Image (spheres, coloured by chain):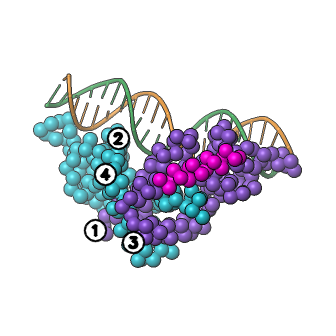
Chain colours: A cyan, B purple, C green, D orange
Amino acid sequence: MSSDPRSSVSFLLAKVGQVATTRFTAKLAPYGVKAKHVGLLALLSGGTRDFQQELGRRLGVAPSLIVAMADELEQLGAITRIRDPDDRRKSTLEVTDSGRDLLKKCTRALQEVDDELLTHVSQADREVLHKILNPLLRSAAEDNPKEPRA
Amino acid sequence: MSSDPRSSVSFLLAKVGQVATTRFTAKLAPYGVKAKHVGLLALLSGGTRDFQQELGRRLGVAPSLIVAMADELEQLGAITRIRDPDDRRKSTLEVTDSGRDLLKKCTRALQEVDDELLTHVSQADREVLHKILNPLLRSAAEDNPKEPRA
DNA sequence: TATTGTTATACTCTATAACTATA
DNA sequence: TATAGTTATAGAGTATAACAATA
């Protein structure tokens, strides 16, 4: 029935999203990272030279969280902080070889989560999901600058 | 590229889910409730006679959270606690007229969120989303009893 | 002794605000 | 004085564990 709030698509999306989060948090645990770290690592791996403040803006999180994530990734040897010689207040984050390796492992782990979560979803439907959700996320980010735009 | 973890469907679902949550948390705020309250209210509104422990199991949350939600809904006048005369340890939660009215308002609010979030998604695609996500949530709950099954 | 609801406590997550170092 | 990164603090959210009433 359409009068049930639980039939709202966004309600459904929220619940499914929570399940997905729980699943890949568990799957990533052996590597000592959470989803947010993978998001940052993937962004950095694209060759970004943004400094930390800008990274925060792009990921839609507070600068202090970037610091925390960078600390953790640095401790894992996945990144190194590099001070800008021209302005020593700024620093960029560089992915190490070990970090690239970690990223690959996490990527495989996430693909496993996809396979497990979407067991009963056909390949065609997975592509449809992708085609719908990706632009949805982008348009949502445009509406509200606080949402991640990277 | 398929080697980007951010292209994982579950990664995408998690992010979209977070956006959806943020959106309708804001939309529901004027009514003094959050999404979880609406979920409980909708479940109760279906005529459930389950006592609190069982509600917790069905929603996949701790009993103490049921207590907190019941407290809040009771304060809003949306439900009343009814002690089971046969076993006074147990109690069921009954939706009041005011609660039914609140539920209707929340349902409308969620439909508004759908419309806003899915502005650029065609009606056909919305139905596809629904058809994919609903069974996905059910099968996920079967896999893992800790996930909501109601 | 076992179970229901409840309360107390602790933990996770993340943002805001205060601080430091550079500019 | 202003800005980047950092650290300290606080708030939301929820689970676990202790507790009281009832069985």
Residue type, label 2:
Ala
Q: Which residue is mark 1?
A: B1
Q: Position of residue B26 (x, y in %)?
A: 47, 44
Q: Is residue B62 visible?
A: no
User: Which secondary structure class fits the magenta region best?
Assistant: helix
Residue A128 against residue A96 in the figure, above or below? below
Count residues near mark 3 (Cα–Cα under 10 Å), then give few for <14, some for 14-19, many for 20+. some
The CA distance from mark 3 to mark 1 is 17 Å
Q: Quadrant of residue A92?
A: top left
Which label belongs to residue A119?
Answer: none
Asked whether the residues under marks 1 and 4 belong to the same chain, the reply is no
Do the CB atoms of the residues marked 3 and 1 lie less than 8 Å apart?
no
Do the CB atoms of the residues marked 1 and 4 lie less than 8 Å apart?
no
The magenta-colored residue range is: B96-112
Q: Which residue is mark 3?
A: A128
Q: Nearer the N terminus, badge 4 or badge 2?
A: 2
